[in-house]
């Protein structure tokens, strides 16, 4: 092999290594995002607020009902 061929081969290898590293980094980012999303979702479900039951209002007696009871 000539000197130029060796240089080209080395450059190609370096580029491949850089691409592999970038791919690994990208995969790590994806995993991290996925983990964060899952954690967030778990937290939301764990701390979900319970709905408060509505209290029924007591009916107030009207004047007519009061008069009927007195009779």
Image (cartoon, rainbow, N blue to C red):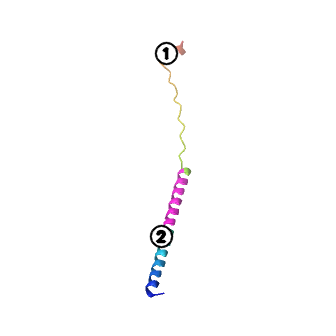
Where are the magenta residues, as a range? 25-44
Quadrant the C terminus occupies: top right
Residue placed furthest toward the front: 1
**Residue 53 at what x, y percent from top left?**
54, 37
Q: Secondary structure at mark 2?
A: helix
Few, some or many residues within 10 Å of mark 2 (<14, 14–19, 20+) = few
Residue 70 vs residue 39, the one in the foreground: 39
**Residue 23 at what x, y percent from top left?**
49, 68
Residue placed furthest toward the left: 4
Residue 26 vs residue 5, the one in the foreground: 5
Few, some or many residues within 10 Å of mark 1 (<14, 14–19, 20+) = few
The secondary structure that most of the magenta stretch takes on is helix
Residue 43 on the magenta segment: yes
Query: Who's the residue at 45% across and 81% down the image?
Result: 8
58 vs 52: above or below? above
Query: Who's the residue at 56% across and 51% down the image?
Result: 46
Q: Does label 1 or label 2 sit earlier along the sequence?
A: 2
Residue 23 vs residue 15, the one in the foreground: 15
Question: Marks 1/2: CA distance?
Answer: 83 Å
Query: Who's the residue at 51% across and 69% down the image?
Result: 24
Mark sitting on residue 37? none
Marks 1 and 2: which is nearer the front?
2
19 vs 33: above or below? below
Mark sitting on residue 22? 2
Query: Who's the residue at 53% across and 53% down the image?
Result: 41
59 vs 31: above or below? above
- Name the residue beneath numbered marker 1: 64
**Residue 67 at what x, y percent from top left?**
50, 14
Residue 39 vs residue 21, the one in the foreground: 21
């Amino acid at each position: 092999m000539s000197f130029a061929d060796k240089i080209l081969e080395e450059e190609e290898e370096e580029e491949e290594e850089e691409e592999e590293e970038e791919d690994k980094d990208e995969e790590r980012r994806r995993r991290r995002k996925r983990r964060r999303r899952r954690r967030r979702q778990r937290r939301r479900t764990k701390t979900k607020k319970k709905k408060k039951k509505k209290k029924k209002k007591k009916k107030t007696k009207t004047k007519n009902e009061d008069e009927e009871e007195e009779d």
